[in-house]
Amino acid sequence: MSLVDAVLALVIAGLTAYVVLAGADFGAGFWELMSGPGPKGAQMRAAIHRSVGPVWEANHVWLIFVLVLLWTAFPVAFGAIMSTLAIPMFLAAMGIILRGSAFAFQPHVGTGRLAGLMSAVFGISSVLTPFVMGAAIGGIASGRVPVGNAAGDPWRSWLNPTSLFVGALAVALCAYLAAVYLAADTARGGDRDLVEAFRRRALAAGAVAGVLAVGGLAVVRSDAEHLWVGLTGAALPMVILSGVAGAATLALVWRRRFGIARIGAAVAVSAIVIGWAVAQRPDLLPGELTIADAAAGRPTLVALLIGTGTGAAVLIPSLVWLFRLALRGELVKSEPGEMP
Amino acid sequence: MFELLPSGVASMALPLGRSVRAIVEQTDLVAARQTQALSFAFHIVLVCFGVAFPALVLVMEGLWLRTGDPVYRVIARRWSRVMLVLFAVGVVSGTILSFEFGLLWPRFTARFGEVFGFAFALEGFAFFLEAIFIAIYVYGWDRLRPRTHFLAGLPVVGAGLAGSLFVLSVNGWMNNPTGFDLVDGKVANVRPLEALFNVQLWHTFVHMTLAAYMVVGFVTAGVYALAWLRSRRDRIHRVALVVPLTIACLVAPVQIVVGDWAGRQVASSQPVKLAAFEGLQRTQTGAPLNLLGWYRDGRIVGGIEIPHLLSLLATHDPNGRVPGLDTAAPEDRPPVNVVRISFQLMVGLGTGLAALSGIYLWVWWRRRRLPRSVWFWRAVVVSGPAAIMALWAGWTTTEVGRQPWIVYRVMRTSEAVTAAEGVPIGLIVLLVTYLALGAVTLWVMRRMSRTPLQIPPDAPPPAAASAESG
Ligand code: HDD
Ligand code: HEM
Ligand code: HEM
């Protein structure tokens, strides 16, 4: 593997982690939006907050990680993407700020009108953000981002068939991941009704995501020829893996094997992200810029690899501890009314 | 807040001989700068709480572990919940900044990302650690053993410092660009470590860290000083007042010394910026210092002139030579009044806060008690906002003083700005969002502070707590 490939692999790994971890946090917002009034809805929202509360900030940092790797290792591509796709990126940034702060405020605003508002802001921005991020990726993948300072079309670069498809798929995948994870988390708590509610949602979202993914391939075929060629060529194993893992996950959820289903869902979604990267190789901006041409100079890449390696040595054990505690349900409030 | 409009208005008032497109571009540049300034101004206040507040919380928890007095634990717990909310707002506002590197300045990032980006990659790890351990710390109060819990807080303090070190390294690099060569205008021979550890970094880091402790110390003390003035003077309020106030008062005098260091560093690496601090037109020996006043037509009008002081401060020699604005072409000079007024505001506030600290420390040293004057406590109430003003003013000094360069003497800000349309719309949307977000944050803080600070009847001593969960 060349130096450039190694750094690109880091970017893709970071993006994958962001999608399977933070994606589920966005999906939780989708389910909050759908939770409805009444005591049942309130229970669901409480479960969502218990699951997402301790981990969402760490999950969010994967995005920062991807952004900084991109602008350090592939600066020209970063400038092109952010300037042409300025509108969806700005919307994504707004979505992130609204969602994060609304979520953080929620435990402290009581139960009145403001609480309802916070919940709605959290839910809506949790749907908006993955949609616009997906749309931006669709614009990149379908070759609509040229090199240069805002050289592409500010609207059609992200409002086009491929973008709309990827945006919708992103929302569906987030909802699917969230429902599977939440079913697993609530299964630990032992509230049967809640587990069943999330189980039904996981099955529904999984089915929708599956149908969308297959149908979307037709869109890709007519709208983004080279991506289609890649997905049915070099990336075919990944596409198949995703399908198989997705189907297996549905079966596991059906049989209430939520622990393993969690892993299956993550694999299915990861395979999509990796499959996209493989399908696009060797281009970073299809038709415009190859990965090799986009890459920063050697010293920067070497520094990045060393820095990331060192950082990972500290980061990984810390992440393991956090998730061990979170998955065991150790990170919870215990004094009533003392939600941290 | 960062009213930089004069230059923008001036250029917009010159439509003759300029195409409409040029005016739009100028508006976009002004809007982009204002957006950047707004986003930073918001983020930096929260950053202070990310850097210094965890330490304050840990001091309280440490006192609890040592003494077993539940007062400390109650305060530490309360503060840790405040910390979590402020951290979340800090995280999202920082994310906006990351996006803005591409949204506002794509050509800056595209050209120099490979030089300064390494620092940001390291910063990413610091943020990871901070986010991980803050969650473990705040959510783990009841489940972790007291010592483990305390130890889980230490990485939060360390990661906050590391995160700010790396970001400041990028800012230092923008002011003192090193670690690369330009070959035919293209970046070559990047030396990432040299770029990371530029000479501008160290004073910025120390000055900023102390500023964070001042902001957090004075703001927190101010909140409890208000309660103090309303005669809530039980032990728990007293502790919550005295500890942050003491920390801030120990730091404030030191900040003046560090500020002097910063000034001398600027004098040696960015002489034009220093000239703008003082409105010094001509290069001269034995340069005077002007307090207050307004810079017009190459001189200060209405100021109070103190002979030789500038030379003394900048070079530590009353007859030292200080370069003036005339060492740079007019188009290479920053807007003097914005820079100069910000600088004087920071120094004035810094001196005032140090004086306040002096009173506090003196009374403590001589009489072993707290000051009794109502005016002292009223001053403590406003010391928090004053520290924040000083912080903003300092950053305005640094950032506007760097103009017209985004990378000092290498790339102009106007060359870096995005060509995408709609920057002013983005600015308005962001302004409205930040106003709402700021208002809700303050409201939530107030609401949290309404729950009375008191010791719950069943508060466990540390020994019992460890037996419970061990
Ligand atoms: C609580 C906040 C605070 C206080 C009381 C002071 N400062 Fe400050 N100052 C800052 C907060 C700050 C800052 C954190 O906002 C800046 C912006 C960039 C930096 O390194 O620190 C700054 C920048 C800054 C710079 C420019 C550095 C550069 O451009 O690289 C100088 C010369 C000083 N300061 C000098 C002083 C002096 C002489 C002070 C004495 C009273 C002082 N500051 C008090
Ligand atoms: C003086 C300047 C700055 C300092 C000292 C600083 C420091 C910090 C610190 C300590 C945090 C942790 C969160 C918190 O405590 O609220 C933070 C958050 C953040 N900052 Fe800044 N920052 C500065 C400017 C910037 C800039 C210029 C950027 C980006 C270009 C940025 C991006 C971020 C991001 C993305 C986060 C969120 C990290 C997370 O997800 O945990 N910051 N900053
Ligand atoms: C957090 C405290 C900071 C504040 C309050 C602040 C404030 C400002 C202000 C007022 C401007 C506009 C200057 C003008 O247009 O005249 C600006 C510009 C800018 N600052 Fe900062 N700044 C801070 C820290 C940083 C850091 C740490 C970085 C880099 C990592 C940075 C990077 C930039 C960039 C890229 C611009 C735009 C280009 C320019 O105007 O030169 N700033 N900032």
Image (cartoon, grey):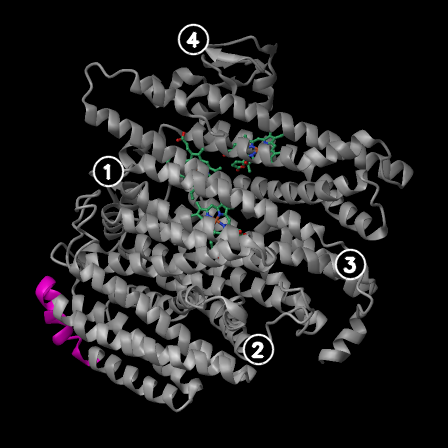
Q: Could you tell me which chain the residue with mark 2 belongs to?
A: A
Q: Mark 1 and mark 3, same subunit? A: yes
Distance CA(mark 4)–CA(mark 1): 34 Å
From this view, report whether residue A136 is shown above or below residue B410: below
Residue A231 among those drawn in magenta: yes
At numbered mark 3, what does the secondary structure look like: helix, strand or loop?
helix
Q: Is residue B194 left or right of residue B58?
A: left
Measuring from the top left, give residue B164's x and y in whole percent.
Answer: 51, 49
Left or right of A19? Residue B65 is right
Mark 4 close to ligand 3, CB under 8 Å: no
Mark sitting earlier along the chain (1/3): 3
**Amino acid on which the number 1 mark rests in the picture:** Ala
Label 4 to label 2, Cα distance in Å? Answer: 68 Å
Residue B162 visible somewhere in the drawing: no
Tag nearer the camera, 4 or 1: 1
Query: Which residue is identified by label 3?
Result: B72
